[in-house]
Image (cartoon, grey):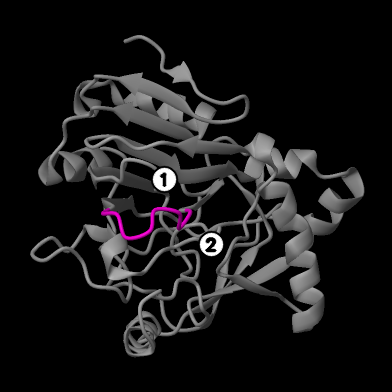
Amino acid sequence: MSDPRPLGGRLGAEYSGADPNALPLDALNAALLKHKVLVFRDAGLDEEGQLRFAARFGALTRAHPTVPSVEGRPDILPVDGAEGIRSNTWHTDVSFVRTPPKLSTLRALVVPPHGGNTLIASSAAAYRDLPRQLRDFADRLWAEHTNDHDYALPRVNAEKAAEYRRRFVSRRYRTAHPVVRVHPETRERGLFIGGFAQKIVGLSGTESRDILRLFQAYVTRPENILRVQWNPGDLVLFDNRITQHYAPDDYGDQARVLHRVTVAGDAPFGVTGDASYIIEGDEAAHYTPVLATV
């Protein structure tokens, strides 16, 4: 198997015309750990193929803890711009539960002729960019992640916005994660924050916002970002443990439909080895298998 073609200086690599399910798993996992994001052009997968591919990396989660799945497909989350729910906020998938997904896959069904890209950032590169004094500071911090905030609101009307928010927070979750997460396989350190991180443990809201903005600015430096320009049939796999992503809302009323399937993960741990813990809510066992900390 040939190595994937690097796409960015700090993350991202691409396979062209390859069936992802025919590629050796060991080589795929090594490439993912190295590049953080793998883009499969013209992958040719249907729903079953996407599910089969994701399941090669471990047990699957359900689509989402609170948001409905594709009808009849409990493990597939529809990402449909026509619904008006557009996640143009930097985030790590479902980081408000104690065991967020390990990996995420996105498959493009319908994409606009222009716009509708996905941006993915390396939180490992962001951590390395920090001055030593800020790395030392971040190593000691914990952040509260929650689904009870305006992560993604409809751009349509107040009634739809109220219904979406009611559904999104129908189960409330608040979890403390280390601001610096140690990757369980590579032992790299990355800034584990993003849109669901709303407060630094032990600090006020004002202090928390200032600190989180400071660290988030390192994640979203242009040199740390890969822009994925979609074609129908493309599949993207990214390491949810050490990346963030963002979907720019720049395609107006054009159609954009992706399907997301995620692989269950374990509880993050920080530089001291302490694992994430629940502040409010439960283990979300209806959504994801509860895995032990590595």
Classify mark 1: helix, strand or loop. loop
Residue at the image position 35 percent from the left and 77 percent from the top: 156
Classify mark 2: helix, strand or loop. loop
Read off the magenta span. 248-255
Question: Residue 28 at what x, y percent from top left?
Answer: 36, 26
As displayed, is residue 27 above or below residue 159? Answer: above
Residue at the image position 32 percent from the left and 28 percent from the top: 40
Q: Residues within 10 Å of mark 1 (few under 14, many from 20)?
A: some
Per the picture, the main secondary structure of the magenta-coloured stretch is loop
First in sequence: mark 1 vs mark 2: 2
Identify the mark at residue 89; answer none if there is no mark: 2
The amino acid marked with disc number 2 is Thr
Q: Residues within 10 Å of mark 2 (few under 14, many from 20)?
A: some
Q: Per the image, is 53 magenta?
A: no
As displayed, is residue 191 above or below residue 56? Answer: below
Identify the mark at residue 115; answer none if there is no mark: 1
Position of 77 with respect to 116 (left or right) is left
Position of 92 with respect to 286 (left or right) is right
Camera-side residue of 132 and 79: 79
Position of 269 with respect to 119 (left or right) is right
Q: Quadrant where the N terminus lies?
A: top left
The amino acid marked with disc number 1 is Gly
Tell me which corner region of the image, top left, top right, bottom left or bottom right, holds residue 231: top left
